[in-house]
Image: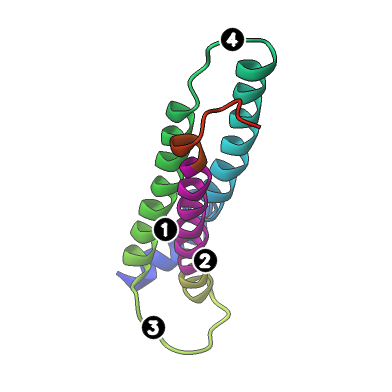
Amino acid sequence: MPERNEEYFSRGAGIAWLWAGILAGPVAVALNQQIAYLLVTLNCSYGKSAPVTPVMLIAAALAVSGIFISRRNWRRIGGEGEKGGGDATSRSRFMAVVGLLFSGFSALVIVAMWLPVLFYRQCQR
């Protein structure tokens, strides 16, 4: 089984899933911020009615999906392993942990960005 996992994480699909786990959270934060700013500008400057909360929920779901992808990668490669390395297994373990941390922190950032939307009016200055 470990040989099969090492082969999987040495090829394109395994590497793509590792990167998806790492990048899902930060991309969600960036998209959330840009789209929320756009919608608030439309609401305040042009009087359009565009809800911001669904955008925040979708971004939070994207960040949480990064957590699940990284967790799946972590479980597939095996949580604990030998120290050191330099092989595909050690790299995959590291990338899975980084993905868990990045996506988890990104989900917290999105929640923190969502709190002012809940408590303040959008055009309050």
Q: CA distance from mark 1 to mark 3?
A: 17 Å
Residue placed under numbered mark 4 in the picture: 48
User: Amino acid type of disc 2?
Assistant: Val
Residue placed under numbered mark 3 in the picture: 81
Can you give x and y, in whole percent of width and height, for residue 101 in the image? 48, 64
User: Which residue appears at 48% of the width and 48% of the height?
Assistant: 13
Q: What span is in magenta?
A: 96-115
Nearer to us: label 3 or label 4: 4
User: Amino acid type of disc 3?
Assistant: Gly
- Dot 3 lies on which element? loop
Mark 4, other Cα within 10 Å: few <14 / some 14–19 / many ≥20? few
Q: CA distance from mark 3 to mark 2?
A: 16 Å
Residue placed under numbered mark 2 in the picture: 98
Is 106 magenta? The answer is yes
Can you give x and y, in whole percent of width and height, for residue 9 in the image? 47, 61
Residue reaching furthest to the right: 45
Q: Does residue 68 appear left or right of residue 16 in this picture?
A: left
Can you give x and y, in whole percent of width and height, for residue 40 in the image? 61, 25
Report the number of numbered marks. Answer: 4
Q: Earlier in the sequence, mark 3 or mark 2?
A: 3
Nearer to us: label 1 or label 3: 1
Residue placed under numbered mark 1 in the picture: 70
Is 105 magenta? The answer is yes
Q: Earlier in the sequence, mark 2 or mark 1?
A: 1
Q: Earlier in the sequence, mark 3 or mark 4?
A: 4
- CB under 8 Å between discs 2 and 1: yes
Mark 2, other Cα within 10 Å: few <14 / some 14–19 / many ≥20? some
Nearer to us: label 3 or label 2: 2
Q: Quadrant of the N terminus?
A: bottom left
Q: Nearer the viewer, residue 107 or 82?
A: 107
